[in-house]
Image (cartoon, rainbow, N blue to C red):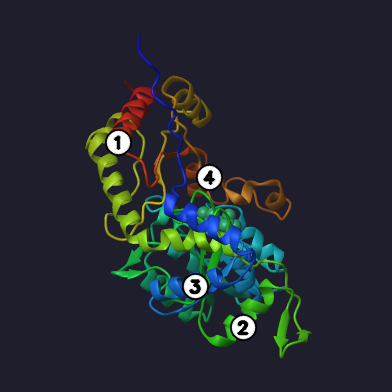
């Protein structure tokens, strides 16, 4: 009799025993909210990102909302982004009162198509929010050339891209605003959290105000509030989780690249022809391989495929993401099916296969065998 193989999730957080001990020390220290660990984590992130100024927050969503506020973007302004991202990317545009505008994606990279992005620019466009889906950067030189040509601010949604690179430089070490998420599934997690890379001390001061009720303190009892801020600060508990993982971030990306390479080796050269499915771009240089996603052929219903993977092979899969413009909130703003055909195709046919820091090569082989058996064998 066969023992069923253990359940394999598509993502699993990786927190070392040493880090768990450190979190215990924070809990015993009596200082639970933002304190010395947050400062140390911001300093460590800044060092990793080439000395740029970094501020931490309690999510990778508020980071983008605050970047939009720092840039002075609001009612009457248009912000262009991709329909294939976590809905947060577009929600923050609405949150600050601006108008979200979508441009379709490139079918190969699954990131914003820069030709379509440029075509979507109007005199009201103030900013763009590019997303590096699965950790794969876009053509960063061309994206920033477009931003410069039309005088646009850039808020990079690099939520998935800590440890990714462009021409050898870490994503976040150059550019305009860069936002990272440390949500539980990300390559580095603080359970929930995020950080924003800003350009100067003035922006950093504004970021600090927006993350804590707009407060500025002076002297022993001085306090003033001059902007409307929220409650977005990171805790020392979360920062301690981040401090434990940050030194590993390049090794994590390297390990995931080797797992991705193993996926390609196991699928083999003829997989796409035989199955009609599409593998991701085989980038072994820039991407941190946050996710490994395949696009199912149109003849396969994704829900059936995911159910079969789970019930017959005990393998969890995910989908990242459904097209944002077709959610009710966005349809109510006038978006309709057919507007972004590439995003709609990919949004309904994409499947995320297991990829996490502690995934073993044998498990990759097991996933590939299961995918093949669900698709054509
Ligand atoms: C995770 C993620 C976010 C949001 O980050 P949170 O920390 O969950 O707020 C935004 N955009 C993308 C592309 C993400 O993957």
- Residue under label 2: 205
Sequence-wise first label, 4 or 1: 1
Spatial separation of the CA atoms under disc 3 and disc 1: 47 Å
Identify the residue at horizontal 63%, vertical 47% (top origin): 326
- Tell me whether the residue at label 2 lies in contact with that at label 3, contact meaning CB atoms closer than 8 angstroms: no
Camera sees residue 161: no
User: Please, which residue is most extreme toward the bottom here?
Assistant: 219
Residue 238 rendering spot, x and y as whole percentages: 56, 60
For the residue labelled by badge 3, is the local secondary structure a helix, a strand or a loop? helix
Relative to 356, say whether 152 is above or below.
Answer: below
Identify the residue at horizontal 34%, vertical 57% (top origin): 287
Does the Cβ of the disc 1 residue fall within 8 Å of ligand 1? no
Spatial separation of the CA atoms under disc 4 and disc 1: 20 Å
- Residue under label 1: 272
Q: Which quadrant does the C terminus fall into?
A: top left
Camera-near label (2 vs 1) is 2
What is the number of the mark on residue 40? 3
Residue 172 rendering spot, x and y as whole percentages: 43, 71
Identify the residue at horizontal 32%, vertical 29% (top origin): 366
- Tell me whether the residue at label 4 lies in contact with that at label 1, contact meaning CB atoms closer than 8 angstroms: no
- Residue under label 4: 344
């Amino acid at each position: 009799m066969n023992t069923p193989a253990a359940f394999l999730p598509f993502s699993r957080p990786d927190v070392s025993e040493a880090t768990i001990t450190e979190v215990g020390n924070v809990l015993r220290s009596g200082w639970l909210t933002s304190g010395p660990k947050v400062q140390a984590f911001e300093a460590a992130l800044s060092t990793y990102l080439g000395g740029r100024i970094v501020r931490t927050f309690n999510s990778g969503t508020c980071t983008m909302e605050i970047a939009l506020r720092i840039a002075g973007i609001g009612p009457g302004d248009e912000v262009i982004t991709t329909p294939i991202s976590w809905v947060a990317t577009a929600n923050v545009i609405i949150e600050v009162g601006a108008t979200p505008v979508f441009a379709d994606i490139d079918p190969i990279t699954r990131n914003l198509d820069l030709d379509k992005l440029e075509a979507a620019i109007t005199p009201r466009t103030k900013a763009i929010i590019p997303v590096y889906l699965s950790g794969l950067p876009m053509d960063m030189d061309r994206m920033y050339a477009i931003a410069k040509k039309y005088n646009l601010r850039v808020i990079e949604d690099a939520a998935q891209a800590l440890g990714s690179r462009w021409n050898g430089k870490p994503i976040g070490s150059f550019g305009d605003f860069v936002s990272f998420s440390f949500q539980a599934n990300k390559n580095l997690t603080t359970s929930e959290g995020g950080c924003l890379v800003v350009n100067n001390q003035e922006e950093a001061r504004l970021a600090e105000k927006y993350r804590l009720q707009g407060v500025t303190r002076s002297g022993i009892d001085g306090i003033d509030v001059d902007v409307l801020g929220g409650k977005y600060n990171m805790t020392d508990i979360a920062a301690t989780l981040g401090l434990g993982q940050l030194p590993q971030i390049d090794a994590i990306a390297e390990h995931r690249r080797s797992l991705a390479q193993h996926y390609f080796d196991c699928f083999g050269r003829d997989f796409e022809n035989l199955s009609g499915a599409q593998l991701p771009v085989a980038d072994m240089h820039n991407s941190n391989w946050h996710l490994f996603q395949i696009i199912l052929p149109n003849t396969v219903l994704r829900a059936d495929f995911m159910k079969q993977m789970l019930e017959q092979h005990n393998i969890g899969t995910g989908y990242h993401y459904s097209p944002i413009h077709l959610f009710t909130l966005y349809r109510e703003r006038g978006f309709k099916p057919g507007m972004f055909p590439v995003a709609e195709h990919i949004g309904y046919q994409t499947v995320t296969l297991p990829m996490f820091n502690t995934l073993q090569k044998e498990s990759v082989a097991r996933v590939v065998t299961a995918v093949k058996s669900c698709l054509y064998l």
